[in-house]
Image (cartoon, grey):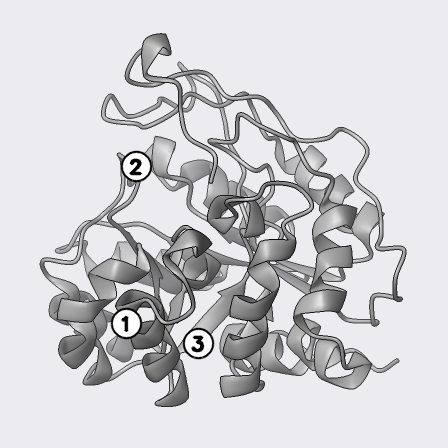
Amino acid sequence: MSKADPSKGPAPACPGPDPAPRRPTRYVVPPGAVDTHAHVIGLPPTYPFVDARSYTPPAATPESYLAMLDATGMTYGVVVQVSVHGTDNRLMLETLQAHRDRLKGIAVIPLGLPDKELAALKDAGVVGLRLNILYGGGIGFERVGEYAAMAKELGWHLQFLIDAKDLVPLAPQLGGLPVPFIVDHWGHFPVSRGIDDPGFQTLVSLVRDGAWVKLSGAYRNTVAGFPYLDTIPFARLLHETAPDRCVWGSDWPHVATWQHMMNVGELLDLLADWVPDAAARDRVFTDNAYRLYGFTPVQG
């Protein structure tokens, strides 16, 4: 798992993504494919960074993001509010509004927003709310019940950026939520803990009982490093547990990464090992994502 270098200060600079993303070489991305997890990032002073951030990224412009989708064969994309912008969703919303036919969004908001602002988020294409306890600038889990009630009223789901070990005490509460929820990067935990790790097994149990999971972030979970082969048994087990509730995300532009800067095409190739069956893999890209995010199916 990539870690920041403490010697560089509390918010070290991280590199940008590979400038030439490509399609996978091991299979053909199906028509209508969805990348369910990426970020757009602006720069101060126009788009300020939160002081409590865990890293300092370069810009990841909407234009570069759309070019990445095109280069990798993605028809649709989901823009997730990045932690360094905190609850300032402006750039994410501007990106959605400019590409309403192609993009959906996941917002990070405080409780108590006026109904008018919530309606504006929904109108722009926001379909869920993200709670994040891993990176500075996120919203924690202390009031997850209130967020779930808000999401239910708006027809949204919840998205959790959390280490699998922290799911153990939360599992009873999460299992009773009145809305769908999805776990980013299948628990964001080092695979050295093993497949029998209580946190990972709690994630498996939650997924078995109805939770969604993102097959993403291999470079955040690996211990062996690129090409992330040590992640294969974990991702396969999650997919086998609920093949209809797994989606794929690039996690572009791969913030907080200081080791091998992977190409999105390499991550797509890894999915062939995570989900070897071609028809099941196509459903991860299409049918599953359509159901959770509300995209219009594309006929091949």
Which label belongs to residue 212?
3
Q: Kindly identify which residue carries mark 2.
A: 86
Crowd tier of the residue under label 1, counting other residues whose Cα lies within 10 Å: few below 14, some 14–19, many 20 or above: some
> Where residue 254 sits: x, y (%)?
56, 38
- Three-letter code for the amino acid on which mark 1 is drawn: Ala
Tell me: residue 238, above or below residue 242: above
Judge by depth and name the residue closer to the eye, 22 or 80.
Answer: 22
Q: Left or right: 256 with respect to 265?
A: left
Residue under the point 40% across and 70% down = 182
Crowd tier of the residue under label 2, counting other residues whose Cα lies within 10 Å: few below 14, some 14–19, many 20 or above: many
Q: Earlier in the sequence, mark 1 or mark 2?
A: 2
> Where residue 52 sits: x, y (%)?
23, 26
Judge by depth and name the residue closer to the eye, 47 or 32.
Answer: 32
Placement of the C terminus among the 4 image quadrants: bottom right
Crowd tier of the residue under label 3, counting other residues whose Cα lies within 10 Å: few below 14, some 14–19, many 20 or above: many
Labelled pair 1, 2 in contact (Cβ < 8 Å): no
Q: Place residue 28 in its image quadrant.
A: bottom right
- Three-letter code for the amino acid on which mark 2 is drawn: Gly
